[in-house]
Image (cartoon, grey):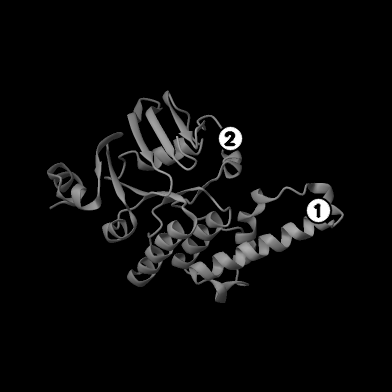
Amino acid sequence: MSAGELRVDQISVAFGGVQALRDFSMHVAAGETCALIGPNGAGKTSLLNAITGRVRLTRGSIAFAGRRIDGIAPHALVRNGIARTFQNLEPLERSTVLDHLLLGTYGLGRAGLAAQALNLKPARVERAHARAVAEEVMEQLGLQGDRDRAVADLSYASRRLVELGRALATRPRLLLLDEPAAGLSETQTASLAQCLVALRAASAVSILLIEHDMRLVESVAQRVVVVNEGRCLTSGTAQAVREDPRVRDLYLGI
């Protein structure tokens, strides 16, 4: 398994009597952007929750970069190079855009509490690096003008970009995006697509995204996985998936 590959092998997830995922397998190659599509309730978010340790597997395994990650605590994933955004935004009350992005850099630090409390050189260097990372991410997402604004005062679309920015600030090797274009205008969605393509080209980050906007999917995804009733229905290029009669009937409605 390569350094940035995600491999999901025959996993199942159940909530009481409801089977959210059934013997589900897929992979995301290093540096690949893969999109998950499917009807609501198909199991897409359950898959992201399984990858990030928010739900327990009843069977199967998940590995990233050659190491099993199922069972790892969610807070430990950042140090393993994995970051995630969520459908529902929960901004810290009155925190600024810059504060949120700096929060994303927290897991990158190594200086320790003593160095931070005594303001030693390693801590100062880390803070300067964190600020540089936050500034770079704001430039990537066009958020420079909102740097000092409270996130709670921003539009829904801008708050979604901040959520993405906080994930990018962790410098992930694997980025998990849950409907990143929800609430964005057509122009903002196009900008998001450009950002994701540029991100993959610049950093070779692997991206797994859930998305209903097929224009975004076709713009950024090298491969599409269709999920239905907790199983992988099919996978392939966006064009191949679009032309699959099962997908046309089930999901695209054409």
**Residue ID at (48%, 51%):** 85
Mark 2 or mark 1: which comes first in sequence? 2
Q: Residue furthest bottom?
A: 145
Q: Residue 51, image x and y in percent?
A: 46, 37
Which residue is label 1 attached to?
A: 116
Disc 2 marks which amino acid? Ala
Which residue is label 2 attached to?
A: 73
Q: Taking 159 as reference, is 235 above or below it?
A: above
Q: Are marks 2 and 1 in contact (CB under 8 Å)?
A: no
Q: Residue furthest right?
A: 118
Q: Quadrant of the N terminus?
A: top left
Secondary element at image label 1: helix
Left or right: 143 as drawn, with respect to 5: right
Left or right: 61 as drawn, with respect to 25: right
Q: Taking 52 as reference, is 22 above or below it?
A: above
Q: Residue 174, image x and y in percent?
A: 48, 47
Disc 1 marks which amino acid? Gln
Asked if residue 164 can be seen in this view, the reply is yes
**Residue ID at (75%, 59%):** 125
Depth order, front residue of 169/237: 237
Left or right: 159 as drawn, with respect to 21: right
Name the quadrant containing residue 8.
Answer: top left
| Mark 2 to mark 1 CA distance (whole Å) | 25 Å
Q: Residue 222, image x and y in percent?
A: 31, 51
**Residue ID at (65%, 48%):** 107
Depth order, front residue of 93/190: 190
Nearer the viewer's eye, disc 2 or disc 1? 1
Q: Residue 121, image x and y in percent?
A: 82, 58
